Amino acid sequence: MKTLRCFPGLLFLLFTTSLFGQNPNLPDDLLSEDFHAGRREALRAKMPDNSVAVFFANPVRNRANDVDYLYHQDPNFYYLTGHREPHAILVIFKEKQQLNGKRTDELIFVQGHDALKELYNGARLGKEGARTNLGFSVAYEGSDFADLPIDFSKFDQVLFYEFHNDVRNSTDKEDLYDLIVAFKRKARYPSHSQILGLEPQQNNLNTKTLDSLMQKLRGIKTAEELDLLRKAAYISALGQREVMKAIRPGMSELEVQGMHEFVYKKYRAEYEGYPSIVGAGHNGCVLHYIENYKPEIEDGELILMDLGAEYHGYTADVTRTSPGKGKIRREQEGRCD
C-alpha cells in the first residue's frame, strides 16, 4: 500500500520532469537549441527545390532477453535535433507546407508519455518538451505520424537513407518499426515485386543524395563543435597519459581498458567513440582487436591502445603503444639503422 500511495507523486514528477527537460541535471556545454536549428536551416538551403528529407532515430539494440544496450542516438539525427530518445522521426521540407492548419517547414515526431514505461525507463521529452526544449514549433507524438496527411507524392524528391531491415518490432505501436512501416506506405516505398521490375515504381524516392548533403554539411565544423572535439581529444589523451603511468606487467587487457574508460567517465564523456582496442603482444597486430581478454600482460610486451572518448556526440581517436614496464627497447622501435 505504501508503494501505491507514492505512485501518483512519482507520476507527477515524471511528467513535470519531461515537460521541462529530459534531465534536470544536464551539462552546461551541450550544443544549444539554436545550433541544431541552424544546422537544419543549413541543410534546407542545400536541398533541391520541392524536396523533403526524412530522418529516423537509431533503433534500440537488444543485448539479451529483456535487456537492451545503452541507447545511442543516430549522429545525424542528434546533429539536427539535439534529441537523445529513440522511436522518433524528423521531417524537413525545402519550402513551407500547410498541414492541419499549421504552416511549417519542419516536423518532429517523438515518443508520447507512458506513465508505466517512464517509471521504469525514465522521463520522456514528449511533444511538449520537443517544442519547449528542442525548439520545434510543430511537434507530434509518433502515433500521429501514420494519419498525418503528408502527401509525399507531390515532392520532386523524397530524400532518406535506405533501410537495412534490422529494426525489431516491439509491442509498442509507435515504435521505430511501425514508424518505418507507416513511412513506406505513405511514400509508396517499392514492394518486392516492384524492385524486381514486375510493377511500376514511384520515381521520386532518393536514397543517394541525402548522405552527400550531410557529409558536406558536417565536414565543416562550427566553433561550438570544435570546442567539443578539443574536449574529446583532451580527455582521450589524458587517458593515455594516466594509463601509461599506471600500467604494469601482470595486468589484464581488460584492466587497462577499464583505466582508460574510468578517465573518460571521470571527465564526463558519455561513451567510448568506438569499441576500445587494447592489444598486448601479438594481439596488437590485429587491426580491430576488441576482445581485450588476455588475462596477463607479460613483462617485455608492448601494449597497443587505440581508444577515444565521445564527448557530447563528438569523438576523438588516439592510438599509442607502450611497454608494460620501463622503456621501449631498441629492437621494438622498428628502426632500420
Image (spheres, rainbow, N blue to C red):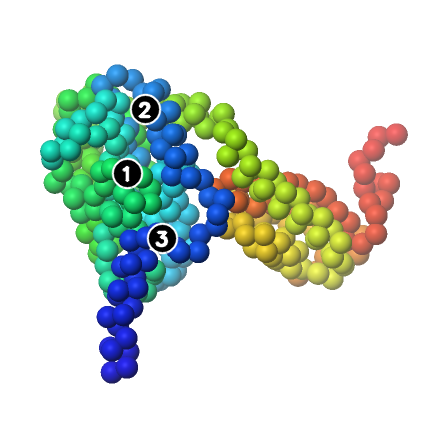
Tag on residue 22?
3
User: Which residue appears at 23% of the width and 59% of the height?
Assistant: 114
Amino acid found under the numbered disc labelled 3: Gln
Quarter assignment of residue 334? top right
Residue where numbered disc 2 is placed:
44
**Which corner quadrant holds the N terminus?**
bottom left
Task: Give the mark, 1 or 3, whose residue is nearer the N terminus.
Answer: 3
Q: Is residue 246 above or below residue 272?
A: below
Quarter assignment of residue 25? bottom left
Nearer-the-camera pick, 161 or 52: 52
Nearer-the-camera pick, 227 or 146: 227
Q: Is residue 232 above or below residue 209?
A: below
Residue where numbered disc 1 is placed:
136
Furthest toward the right, the residue is 337
Residue 253 visible within the image: no
**Which corner quadrant holds the C terminus?**
top right
User: Which residue appears at 45% of the width and 40% of the height?
Assistant: 31
- The answer to whether 230 appears left or right of 59 in the picture is right
Viewer-nearest of discs 2 and 1: 1
